[in-house]
Image (cartoon, grey):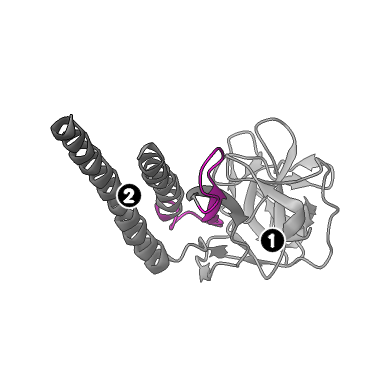
Protein backbone atom coordinates (compact mmCIF):
# COMPACT_ATOMS: atom_id res chain seq x y z
CA UNK A 1 0.00 0.00 0.00
CA UNK A 2 2.81 2.41 0.84
CA UNK A 3 4.30 1.86 -2.63
CA UNK A 4 0.94 2.59 -4.21
CA UNK A 5 0.80 5.89 -2.34
CA UNK A 6 4.41 6.66 -3.24
CA UNK A 7 3.85 6.07 -6.95
CA UNK A 8 0.72 8.25 -6.91
CA UNK A 9 2.47 10.96 -4.88
CA UNK A 10 5.47 11.12 -7.22
CA UNK A 11 3.12 11.27 -10.20
CA UNK A 12 1.33 14.29 -8.73
CA UNK A 13 4.62 15.96 -7.79
CA UNK A 14 6.17 15.50 -11.25
CA UNK A 15 2.99 16.73 -12.95
CA UNK A 16 3.32 19.95 -10.96
CA UNK A 17 6.93 20.34 -12.13
CA UNK A 18 5.93 19.99 -15.77
CA UNK A 19 3.04 22.37 -15.20
CA UNK A 20 5.53 24.96 -13.92
CA UNK A 21 7.63 24.61 -17.08
CA UNK A 22 4.57 24.84 -19.29
CA UNK A 23 3.29 27.89 -17.40
CA UNK A 24 6.69 29.54 -17.82
CA UNK A 25 6.45 29.03 -21.57
CA UNK A 26 2.94 30.47 -21.66
CA UNK A 27 4.03 33.50 -19.64
CA UNK A 28 6.70 34.21 -22.28
CA UNK A 29 4.49 33.68 -25.32
CA UNK A 30 4.85 37.37 -26.16
CA UNK A 31 8.53 37.72 -25.19
CA UNK A 32 10.71 38.71 -28.13
CA UNK A 33 13.01 35.91 -29.30
CA UNK A 34 12.00 33.53 -26.49
CA UNK A 35 12.77 29.84 -26.91
CA UNK A 36 10.36 27.42 -25.23
CA UNK A 37 11.65 24.95 -22.66
CA UNK A 38 10.94 21.28 -23.30
CA UNK A 39 10.14 18.71 -20.62
CA UNK A 40 8.76 15.18 -20.56
CA UNK A 41 7.77 12.29 -18.32
CA UNK A 42 10.11 9.32 -17.98
CA UNK A 43 9.45 5.94 -16.38
CA UNK A 44 11.67 4.92 -13.47
CA UNK A 45 11.74 1.57 -11.74
CA UNK A 46 11.01 1.55 -8.01
CA UNK A 47 14.16 0.44 -6.20
CA UNK A 48 14.02 -2.13 -3.40
CA UNK A 49 12.30 -5.41 -2.72
CA UNK A 50 9.14 -6.23 -4.64
CA UNK A 51 8.00 -6.86 -8.16
CA UNK A 52 10.34 -5.52 -10.87
CA UNK A 53 7.32 -4.20 -12.76
CA UNK A 54 6.73 -1.45 -10.23
CA UNK A 55 7.54 1.92 -11.77
CA UNK A 56 6.80 5.57 -11.29
CA UNK A 57 6.99 8.68 -13.46
CA UNK A 58 9.56 11.42 -13.18
CA UNK A 59 9.67 14.74 -15.01
CA UNK A 60 12.88 15.88 -16.63
CA UNK A 61 14.08 18.69 -18.80
CA UNK A 62 14.48 17.82 -22.46
CA UNK A 63 16.30 20.94 -23.58
CA UNK A 64 14.74 23.78 -25.52
CA UNK A 65 12.77 24.25 -28.71
CA UNK A 66 15.14 25.36 -31.49
CA UNK A 67 12.39 26.25 -33.98
CA UNK A 68 12.34 29.82 -35.28
CA UNK A 69 9.50 32.16 -34.33
CA UNK A 70 7.65 34.35 -36.79
CA UNK A 71 9.08 37.72 -37.84
CA UNK A 72 6.97 40.83 -37.44
CA UNK A 73 7.69 44.18 -39.06
CA UNK A 74 7.88 47.06 -36.57
CA UNK A 75 9.47 49.83 -38.63
CA UNK A 76 11.61 50.81 -35.64
CA UNK A 77 15.23 51.42 -36.76
CA UNK A 78 16.77 49.73 -33.72
CA UNK A 79 14.70 46.55 -34.04
CA UNK A 80 16.52 43.69 -35.76
CA UNK A 81 15.47 40.11 -36.40
CA UNK A 82 17.78 37.26 -37.31
CA UNK A 83 16.88 36.15 -40.84
CA UNK A 84 17.19 32.38 -40.52
CA UNK A 85 19.63 30.64 -38.16
CA UNK A 86 22.04 32.55 -35.97
CA UNK A 87 22.33 34.53 -32.74
CA UNK A 88 23.19 38.00 -31.50
CA UNK A 89 26.12 38.10 -29.08
CA UNK A 90 25.52 40.03 -25.85
CA UNK A 91 27.31 40.45 -22.56
CA UNK A 92 25.61 38.62 -19.69
CA UNK A 93 25.43 39.91 -16.12
CA UNK A 94 28.53 37.88 -15.22
CA UNK A 95 30.52 39.62 -17.96
CA UNK A 96 30.70 36.55 -20.18
CA UNK A 97 29.53 36.32 -23.76
CA UNK A 98 26.06 34.92 -24.29
CA UNK A 99 23.60 34.70 -27.16
CA UNK A 100 20.02 35.73 -27.82
CA UNK A 101 17.52 36.10 -30.66
CA UNK A 102 15.93 39.15 -29.03
CA UNK A 103 16.81 42.09 -31.25
CA UNK A 104 14.81 44.82 -29.50
CA UNK A 105 17.82 47.11 -29.27
CA UNK A 106 18.13 50.36 -27.34
CA UNK A 107 20.74 53.04 -26.74
CA UNK A 108 21.11 54.11 -23.11
CA UNK A 109 22.08 57.53 -21.79
CA UNK A 110 25.78 56.68 -22.15
CA UNK A 111 25.41 55.57 -25.76
CA UNK A 112 25.72 51.86 -24.90
CA UNK A 113 23.79 49.63 -27.29
CA UNK A 114 21.74 47.06 -25.35
CA UNK A 115 18.82 44.76 -25.98
CA UNK A 116 15.46 45.04 -24.25
CA UNK A 117 16.69 43.06 -21.25
CA UNK A 118 19.57 45.50 -20.71
CA UNK A 119 22.37 43.23 -21.94
CA UNK A 120 25.10 45.12 -23.85
CA UNK A 121 25.29 44.11 -27.50
CA UNK A 122 28.77 42.98 -28.51
CA UNK A 123 30.76 43.97 -31.56
CA UNK A 124 34.09 42.61 -32.73
CA UNK A 125 35.91 44.60 -30.03
CA UNK A 126 33.46 44.40 -27.15
CA UNK A 127 30.25 46.27 -26.24
CA UNK A 128 29.10 48.73 -28.90
CA UNK A 129 28.90 52.41 -27.92
CA UNK A 130 27.21 54.90 -30.25
CA UNK A 131 27.75 58.67 -30.30
CA UNK A 132 24.71 60.97 -30.65
CA UNK A 133 23.13 60.49 -34.07
CA UNK A 134 20.23 61.79 -36.13
CA UNK A 135 19.63 58.52 -38.00
CA UNK A 136 20.88 54.95 -37.85
CA UNK A 137 20.98 52.05 -40.30
CA UNK A 138 21.79 48.41 -39.55
CA UNK A 139 22.90 46.37 -42.54
CA UNK A 140 22.03 42.75 -43.26
CA UNK A 141 25.48 41.75 -42.01
CA UNK A 142 24.95 43.60 -38.70
CA UNK A 143 27.05 46.63 -39.63
CA UNK A 144 25.92 49.85 -37.94
CA UNK A 145 26.04 53.18 -39.76
CA UNK A 146 24.90 56.53 -38.42
CA UNK A 147 24.52 60.12 -39.46
CA UNK A 148 26.12 62.08 -36.59
CA UNK A 149 23.89 64.53 -34.82
CA UNK A 150 23.93 67.94 -36.50
CA UNK A 151 25.48 66.59 -39.73
CA UNK A 152 24.00 66.03 -43.19
CA UNK A 153 23.22 62.68 -44.80
CA UNK A 154 26.51 62.81 -46.72
CA UNK A 155 28.45 62.26 -43.46
CA UNK A 156 27.46 58.65 -42.93
CA UNK A 157 29.89 56.89 -40.61
CA UNK A 158 30.17 53.15 -40.01
CA UNK A 159 30.80 52.48 -36.32
CA UNK A 160 31.10 48.74 -36.10
CA UNK A 161 29.28 45.50 -36.57
CA UNK A 162 27.04 43.47 -34.32
CA UNK A 163 28.76 40.20 -33.47
CA UNK A 164 26.66 37.43 -35.05
CA UNK A 165 27.29 33.73 -34.44
CA UNK A 166 25.77 30.48 -35.63
CA UNK A 167 26.89 27.53 -33.47
CA UNK A 168 25.00 24.21 -33.68
CA UNK A 169 21.94 24.15 -31.43
CA UNK A 170 23.32 21.04 -29.71
CA UNK A 171 26.34 23.06 -28.54
CA UNK A 172 24.18 25.64 -26.74
CA UNK A 173 22.69 25.50 -23.27
CA UNK A 174 19.91 27.76 -22.07
CA UNK A 175 20.49 29.58 -18.79
CA UNK A 176 18.02 30.68 -16.15
CA UNK A 177 18.37 34.24 -17.47
CA UNK A 178 17.03 33.17 -20.86
CA UNK A 179 20.39 33.61 -22.55
CA UNK A 180 22.27 30.85 -24.34
CA UNK A 181 25.90 29.88 -23.84
CA UNK A 182 28.29 27.36 -25.30
CA UNK A 183 28.22 24.15 -23.28
CA UNK A 184 32.01 23.96 -23.14
CA UNK A 185 32.31 27.54 -21.83
CA UNK A 186 33.99 28.89 -24.96
CA UNK A 187 32.87 31.75 -27.21
CA UNK A 188 31.28 30.83 -30.52
CA UNK A 189 33.15 32.06 -33.60
CA UNK A 190 31.65 34.92 -35.58
CA UNK A 191 29.71 33.86 -38.65
CA UNK A 192 29.61 35.88 -41.86
CA UNK A 193 26.60 33.88 -43.02
CA UNK A 194 24.14 35.23 -40.44
CA UNK A 195 21.79 37.89 -41.75
CA UNK A 196 19.58 40.38 -39.92
CA UNK A 197 16.54 42.39 -40.97
CA UNK A 198 16.24 45.95 -39.68
CA UNK A 199 12.84 47.16 -38.52
CA UNK A 200 11.63 43.68 -37.56
CA UNK A 201 11.43 41.48 -34.47
CA UNK A 202 11.21 37.73 -34.01
CA UNK A 203 8.39 36.59 -31.79
CA UNK A 204 8.47 33.80 -29.23
CA UNK A 205 8.31 30.28 -30.65
CA UNK A 206 5.81 29.16 -28.00
CA UNK A 207 2.73 27.54 -29.55
CA UNK A 208 -0.01 28.92 -27.31
CA UNK A 209 -2.64 26.39 -28.42
CA UNK A 210 -0.35 23.43 -27.70
CA UNK A 211 0.66 24.93 -24.34
CA UNK A 212 -2.98 25.33 -23.30
CA UNK A 213 -3.76 21.73 -24.29
CA UNK A 214 -0.71 20.58 -22.31
CA UNK A 215 -1.90 22.57 -19.30
CA UNK A 216 -5.27 20.80 -19.37
CA UNK A 217 -3.63 17.40 -19.82
CA UNK A 218 -1.23 17.94 -16.91
CA UNK A 219 -4.11 19.14 -14.73
CA UNK A 220 -5.97 15.90 -15.43
CA UNK A 221 -2.88 13.83 -14.67
CA UNK A 222 -2.53 15.62 -11.35
CA UNK A 223 -6.19 14.99 -10.50
CA UNK A 224 -5.78 11.30 -11.42
CA UNK A 225 -2.77 10.97 -9.12
CA UNK A 226 -4.62 12.66 -6.25
CA UNK A 227 -7.60 10.35 -6.82
CA UNK A 228 -5.22 7.36 -6.66
CA UNK A 229 -3.90 8.58 -3.30
CA UNK A 230 -7.45 8.87 -1.98
CA UNK A 231 -8.19 5.36 -3.21
CA UNK A 232 -5.08 4.07 -1.43
CA UNK A 233 -6.23 5.79 1.76
CA UNK A 234 -9.69 4.24 1.48
CA UNK A 235 -8.24 0.79 0.78
CA UNK A 236 -5.93 1.12 3.77
CA UNK A 237 -8.82 2.11 6.03
CA UNK A 238 -10.91 -0.81 4.78
CA UNK A 239 -8.05 -3.27 5.35
CA UNK A 240 -7.52 -1.98 8.90
CA UNK A 241 -11.22 -2.39 9.62
CA UNK A 242 -11.17 -5.99 8.39
CA UNK A 243 -8.20 -6.75 10.61
CA UNK A 244 -10.04 -5.34 13.62
CA UNK A 245 -13.10 -7.44 12.87
CA UNK A 246 -11.03 -10.62 12.50
CA UNK A 247 -9.20 -9.96 15.77
Numbered tag placed on residue 138 in the rendering: 1
The stretch drawn in magenta includes residue 149: no
Measuring from the top left, give residue 87's x and y in whole percent. Answer: 70, 57
Indicate left or right for 57 with 193 as reference: left
**What distance separates the C-alpha of mark 1 from that of mark 2?**
54 Å
Quarter of the image for the N terminus: give it. top left
Residue at 63% x, 42% y is 175
Quarter of the image for the C terminus: give it. top left
Helix, strand, or loop for circle 2? helix
Query: Which image quarter: residue 221?
Result: bottom left
Most distant residue in the front direction = 247
Residue stretch in magenta: 26-53
Q: Could you tell which of marks 1 and 2 lies nearer the N-terminus?
A: 1
Near mark 1 (Cα within 10 A), the count class, few <14, some 14-19 or many ≥20, is: many
Helix, strand, or loop for circle 1? strand
* Up/down of 139 relative to 232, above or below: below
* Up/down of 169 relative to 245, above or below: below
Residue at 68% x, 70% y is 84
* Up/down of 26 relative to 210, above or below: above
Measuring from the top left, give residue 124's x and y in whole percent. Answer: 84, 47
Measuring from the top left, give residue 169's x and y in whole percent. Answer: 72, 59
Residue at 39% x, 61% y is 214
Give the residue at mark 2: 225
Is residue 143 at least partly visible in the picture?
no
Residue at 17% x, 34% y is 246
Amino acid sequence: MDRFVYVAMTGASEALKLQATNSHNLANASTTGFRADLALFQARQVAGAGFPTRAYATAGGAGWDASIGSVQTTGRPLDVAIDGPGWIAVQARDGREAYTRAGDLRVDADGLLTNGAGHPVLGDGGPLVLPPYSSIAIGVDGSISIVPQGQGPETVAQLGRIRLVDPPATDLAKGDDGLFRMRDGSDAPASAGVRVAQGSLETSNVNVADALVTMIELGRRFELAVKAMRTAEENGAAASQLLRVQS
